[in-house]
Amino acid sequence: MDSRLLLPVHTVLDGAYSIERVLGSGGFGITYAATDLNLGTTVALKEYYPIDFGDRDATMSVRPKSERHKQTFDWGRLSFLEEARMLARFRHPSVVRVSRVFEANATAYMVMDYEDGQNLEAWLTDLGRPPTQEDLDRIAAPLLDALEMMHKENFLHRDIAPDNIVVRTDGSPVLLDFGATRRSVAEMSRTMTRIVKAGYSPQEQYAADNRLQGPWSDLYALGATLYRAVAGRPPEEAALRVADDRTPPAAKAAQGKYRPGFLAAIDRCLTVKHTDRPQSVAQLRPMLLGQRPEPPPGAAHRADIPEAAMDQPRVPPVAPTARPAAKLFLVVAVALLALSAGIYAGFHYTHWDADQQQRKIEDEARHRQQERHAAEAKRERTERLAAEERAEEARRRAEEERAARDRAEAEIRRQQKEREAAEERAARERADAPRERERAEDRAAAERADAIGRISAWIERDFLNDNIAYADMVDWYDQGLIGRDAVLKDRAKYLGNL
């Protein structure tokens, strides 16, 4: 189960890319659809986030799960960056284009073109029928060209499978999700975790050591992918086929009508022993696509030679006849010249030959020593550059960790101050509450006394002038502002006036 924390929607990375949604995930990373804020276009953004030895913290940074995973994590991130830089060199319509690579959140990100379409597995499923020979030719031919270009650069895909091939809306294919980072981590950690794909990875890829891997390894995976297309299921896992191969040949398993040579080429690619497979795209292409291999440059084709000429025996030309006397004189002269030259050279040959041999041995020894020195210097330079890069990476990571720690501490201090201020306000409010109640009661009592005093003065002053209505006296009595005697007096006065 994938328990990795995803980047929230609308997270902005490097000030230029806004996360929109997840496109897919693998053992070493998560790929998002993102908006390029500068261009307003959609890109695919792949994040280095290994599921086995990486974790995301509260700051959205991706870090090793523990100290023992740190070296493997750092090595994988470095390989991720190198893979991105290598892919950025490739320009082919069937290889996903990498436009940028950058580091953020203590990890690395690869910016790729967003390819609109379905992966090959979904395309085959939605097709609802076996693909035709034309369908597969349109997919296989560009993939062969792309692989040939990569193999010339000594770069292997290592993860060709239906879920890593996108079929665009126009029917053209594009390769995604290369396996260089997985292979590098496997070599570093000596583990096979998540570097093979059952049914599609060749036998030699099950070893962490990649000495037996080559273009033929990618051709096995391509053959397995085409087998899935024609048979409706992938071949049996290569590790199981070594002792007991139960995978039926493509010609028997195919569910549609295909060229016999096409199916035979698939079976050649799926040979368990790597030396029995096609060793290059150039060898596989004519077998798979039904093309006639081109003759080597400068070689004459037998069909270009007239049949009559091929059937005629070749007769050597006859040399003109020389006179016997002249011929004898010429032979004697040549013999005398050769004898004199041999006599002259015999005095010096032995010493000259020994000196030449000695100089040759010394030159070869000096050349080998120079090559060793050059190789040693190159190795030391490479190690020095790698050490400097690791030191710079460690320094940068330490600065990022220190900055993150400072931010976290500052945030803790700010929250502590806010909590203390809130507690202080609450304490003041609790302390002031009784005094506020007393002051409110005093104000109410003073206002009541003032009202009573004004009303009493009014009654005394205006009682005989009939300026006070009896109804007002009753209201004041109800409010507790005057006593009962005053109401009775007013009532008696009111009744006496009737």
Image: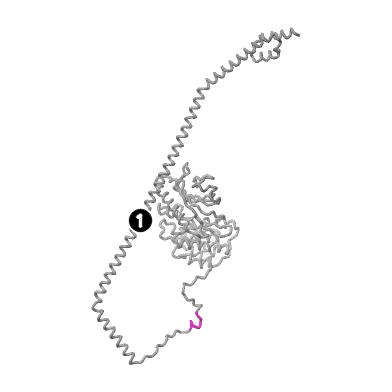
Residue 393: give x, y in percent of width and height. 40, 48
* Residue 308 is inside the magenta segment: yes
What residue does disc 1 label? Answer: 381
Compared across the picture, whether 212 is left or right of 265 comes to left
Q: Nearer the viewer, residue 172 or 253?
A: 172
The residue under the point 29% across, 85% down is 335
Q: Confirm whether residue 259 shows in the render.
A: yes
Classify 10 Å Cα crowding around label 1: few (below 14), some (14-19), many (20 and above).
few
Residue 144: give x, y in percent of width and height. 50, 63
Quarter of the image where the C terminus is located: top right
The residue under the point 39% across, 46% down is 395
Helix, strand or loop for disc 1:
helix
Compared across the picture, whether 44 is left or right of 341 comes to right
- Please report the bounds of the magenta region as a residue range: 305-311
| Residue 236 against residue 32 in the figure, above or below | below
The residue under the point 73% across, 9% down is 494
The dominant secondary structure in magenta is helix
Residue 377: give x, y in percent of width and height. 33, 58
Residue 308: give x, y in percent of width and height. 50, 83
Q: Amino acid at mark 1?
A: Arg
* Residue 320 is inside the magenta segment: no
The residue under the point 66% across, 11% down is 458
